[in-house]
């Protein structure tokens, strides 16, 4: 057999867009997914929208035009900041430490096992400034870069680190890392006005360290406030422009000023949006650099797995989320990646959690060879289109901030907070209806889990933008359930009145159990229930005071009304039915309905109130 004998898909008829539409339409109609009177393309039914209003289509073709993105290492740097990407040595594996008790052995364990740089939170929210020398006493600072995160105390922390370099006789040209100054990020977190003149002086004093960066433009405050990807990118871009304006007023040339900045962005479990985010960020920064007349240079990027997506419940699932996020950041071309340990939402990570965090990246780099391909997503019609639309949305938000007087003014006036709050409100609705699912929390919860216990982390600065985690509302309900269990020896419960044989009620019973357990409510079921008397007897035996009728439409027609009546006669203070509200269902006499797409949080809160669960 020769190569000419192998015809790719040669045995199949040629496919075209119209044929694909016809096949999809047929499947959707067969499953009753096409609304009556729907005459638009089937793509509309399968499309989704991001929080930036970008429509994500189910199919992309060569007709989905995106601008020419050039080559890796060349403007606009969409395909990578360097010609070889991360293929030569992989990306920088950066481990975060914020434990006040962090010592030299802890950081050495990281550096000896795959970590290539350190991110140290210094000050009241982390390692005491006076202990910085002890923590780094055995670290080769010219080989393992250190990035500081000291909030308002960035100058004192930076001087402490530079003193360590000087004491060890390290040449200025060999000093690497980032002093981590980010006064606008601190303003976003605390509401304290930023002093950009002090930042400019700080950069001017350290400009002779040629390979040392002084400023970290952090997008996490906007991400953690519930913002969208474009809002995070646009706000970070506005912060960087504000910094450049300030720095270039103190005898620092524009090329040096640009070289002193590094950007930090959140990477989420939405791998394609994460890939597009890092590609779009480089394109946006390239445009700014071009406009200000600086030498073309790629954006230095630090990716952090999203703190907002981490859960305190079923925290082991965070390992999977972080793997996807790190994958997206790596494919997107991030220069450095931090995987937050899986227990970060609970407290200070332990040695095992830090080990898993660094090994996540080792698997991606060493076993999956993820960095071996330069811009692996390049040329994908979907990724290129998504990158382009995300960049446009971020640029529009950036220009809105600039019209408002720049980021310092936009933070002070409330413009940024208001826009982020609007996005968070939309995200909250999707979380409440479980359109945005959280595995292990809002979906497939495990009431019997024994979560690890961790030392509480030092309190982070507050007073500015809010800090959210997507799971927070469900976890608050779970906490209330735990307190009830501790106080009474039992969790709140809802009885599932499962009508008919197992095959008839399993789907809706599973749905109802999943929903109520997400709020910490146990769901004993009645087994096979064939009549109202059996339902009442098993309800009484369960000790519950609320019930949900679960079955097929056929069983509802026959049994829902008498079962609802019997349950109320047996003491049920509230009877719900698993299924969408309809005239037929209303005639059964139930008090409410639970169904796919319902406001699960409202149902859970009302049920907890009915059950007397203390707040």
Image (cartoon, rainbow, N blue to C red):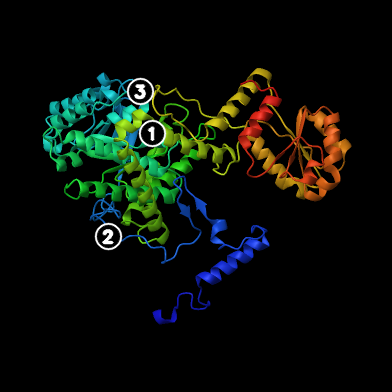
Q: Which mark is residue 70?
A: 2
Q: Indicate the quadrant where residue 219 lies.
A: top left
Q: What residue do we see at 77% from left, 48% from top?
A: 552
Q: Are marks 1 and 3 in contact (CB under 8 Å)?
A: no
Mark 2 / mark 3, whichever is N-terminal = 2
Q: Is residue 545 above or below residue 174?
A: above
How crowded is the residue under tag 2: few (<14 C-alpha within 10 Å), some, or many (20+)? few
Alpha carbons under labels 1 and 3: distance apart: 27 Å
Q: Which mark is residue 14?
A: none
| Residue placed most toward the observer, 53 or 82 | 53
Q: Can residue 424 be seen in this snapshot?
A: yes
Q: What residue do we see at 54% from left, 43% from top?
A: 436
Mark 1 / mark 2, whichever is N-terminal = 2
Q: Secondary structure at mark 2?
A: loop
Reading the image, the residue beneath label 1 is 415
Mark 1 / mark 3, whichever is N-terminal = 3
Position of 270 with respect to 376 (left or right) is right
| Residue placed most toward the observer, 32 or 181 | 32
Position of 20 with respect to 77 (left or right) is right
From the top left corner, tell me how far across and down residue 215 is, in percent: 24, 34
Reading the image, the residue beneath label 3 is 125
| Residue placed most toward the observer, 200 or 263 | 200
Q: What residue do we see at 63% from left, 63% from top?
A: 27
């Amino acid at each position: 057999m020769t190569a000419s004998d192998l015809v790719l898909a040669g045995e199949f008829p040629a496919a075209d867009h119209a044929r694909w539409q016809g096949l999809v339409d047929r499947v959707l109609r067969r499953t009753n997914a096409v609304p009556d009177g729907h005459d638009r393309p089937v793509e509309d039914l399968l499309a989704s929208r991001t929080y930036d209003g970008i429509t994500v289509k189910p199919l992309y073709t060569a007709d989905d035009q995106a601008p020419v993105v050039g080559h890796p290492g060349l403007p606009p740097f969409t395909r990578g900041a360097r010609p070889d990407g991360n293929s030569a040595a992989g990306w920088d594996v950066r481990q975060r430490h914020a434990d006040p008790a962090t010592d030299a052995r802890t950081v050495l364990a990281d550096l000896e096992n795959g970590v290539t740089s350190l991110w140290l939170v210094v000050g009241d929210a982390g390692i005491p400034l006076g202990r910085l020398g002890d923590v780094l006493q055995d670290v080769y600072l010219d080989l393992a870069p250190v990035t500081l995160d000291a909030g308002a105390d960035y100058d004192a922390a930076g001087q402490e680190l530079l003193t360590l370099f000087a004491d060890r006789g390290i040449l200025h040209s060999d000093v690497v890392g980032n002093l981590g100054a980010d006064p606008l990020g601190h303003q976003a977190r605390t509401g304290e006005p930023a002093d950009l003149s002090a930042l400019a002086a700080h950069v001017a004093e350290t400009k002779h360290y040629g390979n040392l960066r002084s400023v970290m433009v952090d997008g996490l405050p906007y991400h953690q406030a519930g913002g969208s990807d474009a809002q995070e990118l646009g706000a970070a871009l506005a912060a960087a422009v504000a910094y450049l304006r300030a720095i270039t007023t103190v005898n620092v040339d524009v090329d040096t000023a640009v070289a002193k900045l590094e950007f930090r962005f959140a990477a989420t479990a939405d791998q394609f949006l994460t890939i597009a985010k890092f590609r779009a960020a480089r394109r946006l920064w390239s445009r700014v650099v071009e406009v200000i007349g600086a030498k073309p240079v790629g954006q230095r990027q630090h990716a952090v797995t999203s703190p907002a997506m981490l859960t305190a419940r079923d925290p082991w699932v965070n390992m999977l989320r972080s793997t996807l996020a790190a994958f997206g950041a790596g494919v997107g071309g991030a220069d450095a990646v931090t995987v937050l340990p899986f227990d970060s939402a609970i407290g200070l990570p332990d040695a095992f959690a830090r080990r898993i965090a660094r090994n996540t990246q080792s698997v991606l780099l060493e076993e999956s060879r993820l960095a071996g391909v330069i811009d692996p997503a390049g040329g994908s019609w979907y990724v290129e289109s998504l990158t382009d639309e995300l960049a446009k949305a971020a640029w529009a938000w950036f220009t809105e901030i600039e019209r408002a007087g720049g980021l310092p003014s936009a933070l002070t006036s409330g413009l940024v907070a208001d826009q982020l709050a609007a996005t968070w409100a939309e995200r909250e609705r999707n979380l409440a209806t479980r359109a945005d699912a959280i595995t292990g929390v809002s979906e497939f919860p495990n009431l019997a889990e024994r979560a690890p216990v961790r030392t509480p982390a030092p309190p982070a600065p507050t007073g500015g933008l809010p800090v959210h985690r997507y799971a927070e509302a469900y976890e608050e309900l779970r906490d209330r359930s735990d307190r009830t269990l501790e106080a009474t020896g039992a969790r709140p419960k809802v009885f599932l009145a499962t009508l008919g044989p197992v095959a008839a009620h399993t789907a809706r019973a599973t749905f109802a159990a999943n929903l109520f357990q997400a709020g910490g409510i146990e769901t004993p079921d009645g087994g096979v229930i064939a009549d109202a008397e059996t339902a009442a007897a098993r309800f009484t035996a369960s000790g519950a005071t609320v019930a949900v009728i679960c079955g097929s439409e056929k069983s509802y027609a026959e049994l829902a009304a008498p079962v609802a009546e019997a349950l109320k006669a047996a003491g049920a203070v509230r009877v719900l039915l698993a299924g969408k509200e309809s005239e037929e269902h209303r005639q059964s006499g139930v008090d409410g309905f639970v169904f796919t797409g319902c406001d699960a949080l409202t149902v859970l809160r009302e049920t907890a109130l009915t059950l007397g669960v203390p707040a």
